[in-house]
Amino acid sequence: MDARWHERAFDELSSAELYAIVALRERVFVVEQTCAYLDADGVDPACRHLWAEAGAILAYLRIVPAGVKYDEVALGRIVTAPEARGTGLGRALVRRGLDAVGGVAVRISAQAHLERFYADFGFRTASDVYLEDGIPHLDMLRAAP
């Protein structure tokens, strides 16, 4: 899929970019997954934001610095728009996220059904399954290369 990639600190986001990011996150995590949760968790201002767009934002993640949520750097709010699934954009997103953080350990809180997807990137299961906002999750860790 032909998309333009962007990576910005929170303070560098335009209001239109932030609105489009939040709209995609709510569209998938709140509406599609029928999960009421507080998306505005106070973490976004500390993060870098990475996304792909082709007219609209089709894939997004936030890079959470070490010490904000976990001891390690984290990738979070990883999301692909329904119309972009199956195109390889989700894989490209995770790869770009890992490239952006460099050779450090990375932790994620993954939806349990995506365990094999993240294992393909070198993540290893680091917890039992737990419920986060009513959805089965597990912590996964990718050691520094």
Image (spheres, rainbow, N blue to C red):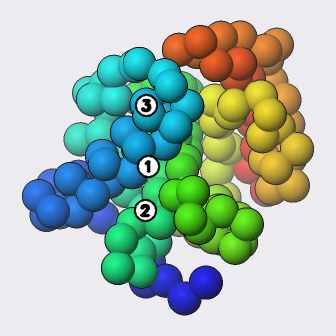
Tag 1: amino acid: Arg
Q: In which quarter of the image is the N terminus?
A: bottom right
Q: Are marks 2 and 3 in contact (CB under 8 Å)?
A: no
Q: Mark 2 highlights which residue?
A: 50
Alpha carbon separation for disc pair 2 and 1: 6 Å
Residue that lies at the very extreme toward the left in this rendered image: 15
Residue drawn 78% across and 40% down?
A: 114
Q: Reading the chain from its start, which is encountered first: label 2 or label 3?
A: 3
Q: Do the residues labelled 2 and 1 touch (CB within 8 Å)?
A: yes
Name the spot of residue 92 as percent of width and height, x first.
65, 70
Per the rendering, the mark at residue 30 is: 3
Residue drawn 23% across and 41% down?
A: 45
Name the spot of residue 80 as percent of width and height, x first.
56, 56
Alpha carbon separation for disc pair 2 and 3: 20 Å
Q: Which of 24 and 68 is in front in this view?
A: 24
Tag 2: amino acid: Leu
Q: Neighbour class for label 1 at 10 Å: few (<14), some, many (≥20)?
A: many
Q: Neighbour class for label 2 at 10 Å: few (<14), some, many (≥20)?
A: many
Secondary structure found at label 2: strand
Name the spot of residue 32 as percent of width and height, x first.
52, 37
